[in-house]
């Protein structure tokens, strides 16, 4: 079997697997996709606002994001097949929504930091929220995350 045929077989298996999924999985997949799109756009805006936008960084981060999420969903899909339950795949999509939601809050915090004193209370609230939600966040608060 050649590489293109193997890739086509994998894609066909994945498509047939997800087409047999319940409607709730389709809905949460759409929600997760919107979270990814909104996070990517807010990251690009925050990076551009800070003057740190480069296409190389964007491509690298997008590739890393897609590979991590594909690995997560593959793992959840495998567990779901073994457990005969779609709940694991739905949980994987909700995990993506949670991670992307946190990233959107961080991007918004970076955008509000340069917005002026009238939005300082909102920026302080977002600082507390992101500090509470991501204790492992070691990025300086005056630099936005790259898109």
Image (cartoon, rainbow, N blue to C red):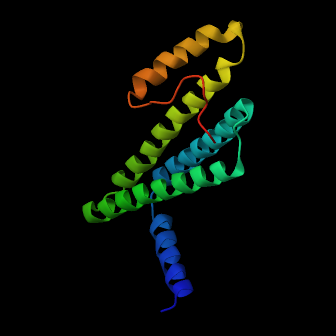
Q: Looking at the picture, tell me which residue is in the foreground, 3 or 60.
A: 60
Q: Residue at x 52, y 39 (%)?
A: 100
Give the side of residue 93 with respect to residue 57, left or right: left
Q: Residue at x 56, y 28 (%)?
A: 105
Residue 124, horizontal then vertical, whole percent: 55, 12
Quadrant that contains the C terminus: top right
Q: Looking at the picture, tell me which residue is in the foreground, 41 or 146.
A: 146
Q: Residue at x 48, y 76 (%)?
A: 10
Q: Residue at x 64, y 38 (%)?
A: 43
* Above or below: residue 49 compared with residue 59: above
* Above or below: residue 110 compared with residue 79: above
Q: Looking at the picture, tell me which residue is in the foreground, 4 or 13.
A: 4
Residue 123, horizontal then vertical, whole percent: 59, 15
Residue 29, horizontal then vertical, whole percent: 52, 51
Which picture quadrant has residue 135? top left
Give the side of residue 49 with respect to residue 36, left or right: right
Residue 144, horizontal then vertical, whole percent: 61, 31
């Amino acid at each position: 079997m050649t590489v293109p045929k193997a890739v086509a077989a994998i894609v066909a298996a994945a498509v047939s697997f997800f087409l047999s999924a319940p409607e709730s999985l389709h809905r949460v997949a759409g929600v997760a996709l919107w979270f990814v799109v909104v996070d990517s756009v807010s990251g690009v805006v925050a990076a551009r606002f800070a003057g740190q936008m480069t296409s190389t960084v964007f491509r690298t981060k997008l590739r890393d994001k897609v590979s991590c999420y594909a690995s997560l969903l593959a793992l959840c899909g495998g567990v779901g097949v073994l457990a005969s339950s779609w709940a694991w795949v739905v949980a994987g999509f909700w995990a993506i929504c949670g991670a992307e939601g946190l990233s959107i809050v961080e991007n918004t915090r970076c955008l509000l930091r340069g917005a002026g004193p009238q939005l300082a209370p909102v920026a302080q609230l977002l600082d507390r929220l992101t500090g509470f939600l991501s204790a492992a966040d070691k990025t300086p608060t005056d630099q936005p995350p790259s898109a």
